[in-house]
Amino acid sequence: MLQSHFVTRLAIDLNTIGEDYCSSSTSDGKSEYFTCRWFDGRLFDRLSTFHLKQQQVVTFERCQVSETWPELFYNVRVLTPSDDLQKELTVPV
């Protein structure tokens, strides 16, 4: 499951998402991945976790179609226990 310090860093309330939009997998009693996706108005959000070398990695993606131009704004944020990186792409549609 998603560790609480990642939720704090992302400022996301998982209680507002609803379980219908989440899936997860476990192996030997340990979480292998966790994914939630939801729409918030014109925004599509996806939150995912996985483990790499026994460290949890979290990705948060946000996608929005521009209201004024035929563009797609795609933002991805990657969190590790020690760092946080965010990039935004603007893609013509």
Image (cartoon, rainbow, N blue to C red):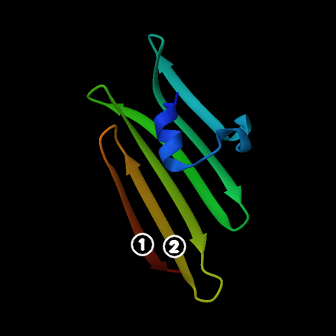
| Label tally | 2
Q: Which element is circle 2 on?
A: strand
Which three-letter amino acid code belongs to the residue tagged 2? Phe
Task: Rate crowding at label 2 as few (under 14), some (14 to 19) or many (20 or more) other CA atoms within 10 Å.
Answer: some
Q: Is residue 70 above or below residue 32?
A: below
* Secondary structure type for disc 1: strand
Sequence-wise first label, 2 or 1: 2
Indicate whether 43 appears above or below 24. Answer: below
Residue 4 in percent (x, y) is at 52, 33
Residue found at x 71% / y 59%: 40
Report the front residue among 76 and 16: 16
Q: Residues within 10 Å of mark 1 (few under 14, many from 20)?
A: few
Query: Residue most toward the left?
Result: 53
Badge 2 is on which residue? 73
Q: Which residue is mark 1?
A: 89
Residue found at x 56% / y 29%: 24
Residue 1 lies, in percent from the top left, at: 52, 27
Quarter of the image for residue 71 reads bottom right
Q: Amino acid at mark 1?
A: Leu
**In percent of the image, x 62 and y 48: which residue is there?**
37
- Do tag 2 and tag 1 residues touch (Cβ < 8 Å)? yes
Residue 67 is left or right of residue 62, and the answer is: right
Is residue 42 toward the left or the right of residue 28 in the image?
Answer: right
Q: Position of residue 75 (x, y in %)?
A: 47, 64
In the displayed structure, would residue 67 be above or below residue 79? Answer: below
The numbered mark at residue 58 is none
Q: Identify the residue at horizontal 60%, vertical 42% (top origin).
A: 36
